[in-house]
Amino acid sequence: MVAESRKLEDRLRPWRRALWVWMLIVLAETVHGALRELFIAPVMGDLRARQWGVPVGCALIFAITWLSARWLGARSRGLLLGIGLLWVALTLTFEFTVGRALGYGWPRILSDYDPGRGGFMVLGMAFLWAAPLVAARLRGLESGANA
């Protein structure tokens, strides 16, 4: 019974840590977004500032993921991509909830995800999904196995 409990704990550890890392990512992105709105948007305009925010946000995500990759403890390709998918789902939920709470309508929120309207967030979400795998590979932590 204790051995089974220990196995379960070992399997859940990367997921718990992934939640902590995601919270750090969302905090960094929130600060980034606030600074962008205060200092960059008045100079560049709202759309252009949001467009530039995507590569800057990707750099922040990668830095956090790179620094936390070993602590995260995920080694398999499947687990790393699963963590990325979890991060995307949590981020979309966060983005839509905060956008609505700030009074933005659905057309404004979804425009960030529509390349035809100048939105690059689909690329940002793809990067967020791949970031755990890419960081683990570059740090030599990914085992290549899918299990």
Image (cartoon, helix red, strand yellow):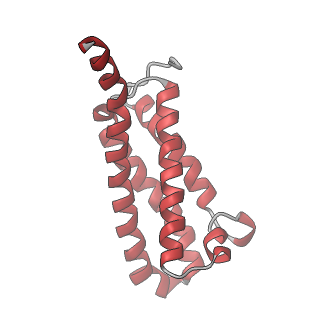
Residue shown at 71% from the left, 64% from the top: 115
Q: Which residue is more in the foreground, 21 or 97?
A: 97
Q: Which residue is more in the foreground, 7 or 33?
A: 7
Which image quadrant is residue 25 in?
A: bottom left
**Furthest-front residue in this view:** 1
**Furthest-right residue in this view:** 116
Q: Position of residue 17 (x, y in %)?
A: 32, 39
* Vertical arrangement, residue 81 with respect to residue 89, above or below: above
**Furthest-left residue in this view:** 2
Residue shown at 66% from the left, 71% from the top: 111
* Vertical arrangement, residue 130 with respect to residue 70, above or below: below
Q: Position of residue 33 (x, y in %)?
A: 42, 71
Which image quadrant is residue 71 in?
A: top left
Residue shown at 53% from the left, 50% from the top: 89
Q: Position of residue 102 (x, y in %)?
A: 48, 80
Q: Which residue is more in the foreground, 45 or 112?
A: 112
How many tags in the picture?
0
Which of the image's four quarters has the N terminus?
A: top left
Q: Which residue is more in the foreground, 12 or 117?
A: 12
Q: Position of residue 107 (x, y in %)?
A: 68, 75
User: Is 62 left or right of 49, judged from the image as shown?
Assistant: left
Residue shown at 51% from the left, 64% from the top: 95
User: Is 80 left or right of 23, judged from the image as shown?
Assistant: right
**Furthest-bottom residue in this view:** 42
